[in-house]
Image: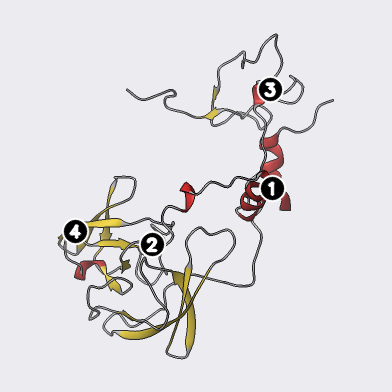
Amino acid sequence: MGKHILTQRRGRGTPQFRSRKTAKVSSTRYPITDPSKTVEYTVRNIIHESGRLAPLMVVYGQGHTYYLPAVKGLEEGRKIFIGPGAPVKDGNIIPVGNLPEGSLVYNIEKVLNDGGKFVKSAGGYAIIMGHEAGWTSIKMPSGKKITFPSSVRATVGIVAGGGVNEKPILKATLHKMTMRARGRKYPTVRGIAMSAVYHPHGGGRHQHPGKSTTVSRLTPPGRKVGNIAARKTGRGK
């Protein structure tokens, strides 16, 4: 009798498939501030946390310490400002409605004071496209344009750590540790390389799925592999 397939074991949620918890950083949320005031903070340190590609800046102000995604070109001891009166300078956190068109931003809030939800990966940035009637249009890294309330905050600049994925890992063990820190299973085996008892794509006289690789969203766990609820497959034309 075969084992549970990889998809089923991932869904079970055991520690093997979860990212490691670290005590270094509990949250990377913006400080909750009065929307009408501008507050000054100081960058005390720049740190790395396992499981994150972007470095974090440790900012201190108002008697509290916060961890935020670092901006490109940041240095220790720098002053950053949070609020509508902050100058448009890399690292400052400003409502998107106060930023001129063409500004590069990251760590964008979805609603005011939620702490930042969008564009937080190393080297990422979004572009302010325009303002209209209390709403701001922003072009995301994917190219999609999304409209946000003009009151939500974002950090001016580009996330530090860009190009980190271009560095070759070289060693399989280092790759394994990297994937483990991100909660990803590594190494993985192709379904067509398995026996039929271990995977729906396995078996046969040569390596081929033997059936459609696109399955329904409602497919049971033992068959839910390949392209799940795909609208189309293959290379786009």
Q: Secondary structure at mark 2?
A: loop
Q: Secondary structure at mark 4?
A: loop
Residue holding disc 3: 193
Residue 174 is left or right of residue 143, and the answer is right
Residue holding disc 4: 102
Q: Residues within 10 Å of mark 2 (few under 14, many from 20)?
A: many
Residue 50 is left or right of residue 5, and the answer is left
Residue 154: where, in percent of width, then height? 32, 67
Ranked by sequence position, the earlier of labels 2 and 3 is 2
Which amino acid is tagged 4?
Gly
Q: Residue at x 22, y 78 (%)?
A: 87
Q: Which mark is residue 173?
A: 1
Residue 166 is left or right of residue 84, and the answer is right
Residue holding disc 2: 159
Q: Secondary structure at mark 1?
A: helix
Proximity of marks 4 and 2: CB atoms separated by less than 8 Å = no
Nearer the viewer's eye, disc 4 or disc 2?
2
Proximity of marks 1 and 3: CB atoms separated by less than 8 Å = no
Residue 29 vs residue 215, the one in the foreground: 29
Which amino acid is tagged 1?
Thr
> CA separation, marks 2 and 3?
40 Å
Which amino acid is tagged 3?
Ala
Residue 2 vs residue 128, the one in the foreground: 128
